[in-house]
Image: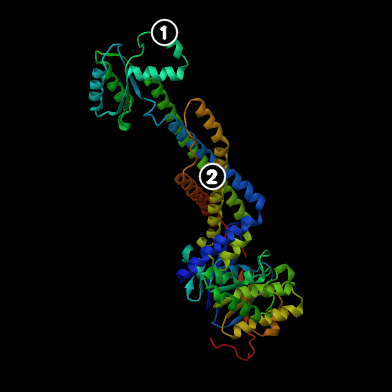
Amino acid sequence: MIGPVTWFTRHVQAALGATGRLARAPLATLFTVGVIGLALAMPLGLKLFVDNARAATGDFANAVDLSVYFKIGTPLEKVQQLAERARARSAVATVTVIPADAALAEFRQYSGFGAALDAIADNPLPHVLGVRPQAGADTPAELAKLREYLASWPEVELVQMDIEWVNRFNAILDVLRRALLIAALVLAVGVLAVVGNTIRLEIQNRRAEIEVTKLVGGTNAFVRRPFLYTGALYGLLGALLAAAIVFAATSVIAPAVADLAAAYGSRFEMLGASRIDTLRLIGGGAALGWLGAWMAAARQLVRIEPRA
Amino acid sequence: MIRFERVAKRYPNGREAIAGVSFDVARGEMVFLTGRSGAGKSTVLKLIALLERPTRGVVTVNGQSTGPLPARKIPAFRRQIGVVFQDHKLLVDRPVFDNVALPLVVAGTPLRELDKRVRAALDQVGLLGKERLLPLELSIGEQQRVGIARAVISRPAVLIADEPTGNLDPELALEVMNVFRRFQEVGTTVMVATHDMHLVREFGKREIVLEGGHVRGVEDVRVPTVGAAAP
């Protein structure tokens, strides 16, 4: 019978042994870890892309702001009144009143047409309401309903909302999300295959050692353990490499993204991989490596029996 | 300790290596297994170490019948048997210490005990101080003795050896055989397969002679041995 200390010692020995073996063949290890790293970097990169696309567009709520243009000459009091009514609806998060005067002043300041505007006696701009839907009420159906309600006021000239753009964007994100899922699955199988094959070859190389170990009474579990640690280590190192690749790529792209955003008047800053995603990647990588090694070892080790 | 009852072994290729072999080896006895190449000596040893299972008959080692033993119990079974091979089966990329310690490591012996016992085992075969060397840095005779140290380190009840002196000159062969006798003298049951008749005569132990897969005879040429353990 073995005690917990011995059990622990065995696992530490197996882990150290696996580390040592990888370190003794740095080039082969580097290739395997490199392949795993690239395979794992792709899903993380894709996830970052999707996350950033969503964040850059203000997580939908911004993209679906409705602009309500009133007919010229509608009194501001009436507009305020209607704004109150809009605020009372559950689907509405905020309502901003932009009086025609304020809009004109802003336009005068930023457009550079100040002098031309002076030539016009009356303010050509209408009062406008900026209506932002609730975060939970931004489905296309809800938005259409809200738009219909706002357009039903007789004082309203036009309700503008790029719902088709929202629909398309939604669809694109959905496609990307599914592609991400499939890519992650395919690449996970790839990692399993790479680790499994590497471990299979290593088992073949250490056949003599396995035979002797079994001969002196080593159990299958004992023989398998170092290979499982090797597999997990491959996965772990591959995941760390993937995290490094994604981090490096993010650092290169982020300034360009900031410039791009600035050109559109946005202060958007690119998101890096979150801590939780990185931890998931590392845990998932190690688990995949362990599983790949287990699959290879389960098939191979039973076949290797000592011969005298 | 080792009992064969009408044991036959037919390999998958159809060759019948032994056909109806019966013998008994008492606890603490040392016997030689002799016969020409192909007489079935190796098969008998493989059946004892459970590297093979009998096609017919019953093999009993230390009170356990090997036939019905489930695969998951084989490791524990093998730990009570020390095996020495002609080609010694050492791991050439591991130092002597690791090779000798392997049976204890797989059995989960605490680390602090390992060092002591490896030294003791190496001392018994006269190799103390060579722990850090690689097997290929040793002479053939020394390698063979490392193999013996590995076979005995877990203090097995049964020690079997397949042509352990096959590659050695007569002087080294005698030395190795003396090592086996010393283990027998402290109570281990020892079975040595050999075709070195000269050596067998010199030791005066019981001899099981195989011929064509049968026991041709058991030569009891025992001479009183000082300190021989009672059965």
B158 vs B202, left or right, is left
Instruction: Tell me if residue A55 can be seen.
Output: yes
Question: Looking at the image, is B83 positioned above or below residue A48?
Answer: below
In the depicted view, which residue is nearer to us: A60 or B48?
A: A60
Reading the image, the residue beneath label 1 is A119
Which element type, helix, strand or loop, lies under badge 1? loop
How dense is the environment of label 2, judged by Cα within 10 Å: few (below 14), some, or many (20 and up)? Answer: many
Q: Disc 2: which chain?
A: A
Give x and y (percent) for residue B43. Answer: 60, 67
The kind of residue on which mark 1 rests is Ala
Q: Earlier in the sequence, mark 2 or mark 1?
A: 1
Give x and y (percent) for residue B27. Answer: 54, 82
Q: Quick check: marks 2 and 1 in contact, CB under 8 Å?
A: no
The kind of residue on which mark 2 rests is Ala
Give x and y (percent) for residue A21. Answer: 62, 58
Reading the image, the residue beneath label 2 is A243
Question: Looking at the image, is A253 positioned above or below residue B197?
Answer: above
Residue at image position (62%, 55%) is A22
Instruction: Tell me if residue B67 can be seen.
Output: no
Question: Looking at the image, is A301 positioned above or below residue B131?
Answer: above
- Which of the colour schemes (rainbow, by chain, secondary structure, one colour) is used? rainbow
Establish whether labels 2 and 1 are both on one chain: yes
In the depicted view, which residue is nearer to us: A122 or A4?
A: A122
The C terminus of chain A - image quarter: bottom right
Residue at image position (59%, 61%) is A17
Residue at image position (65%, 52%) is A26
Question: Looking at the image, is A249 positioned above or below residue B138?
Answer: above
Figure quadrant of residue B146 = bottom right
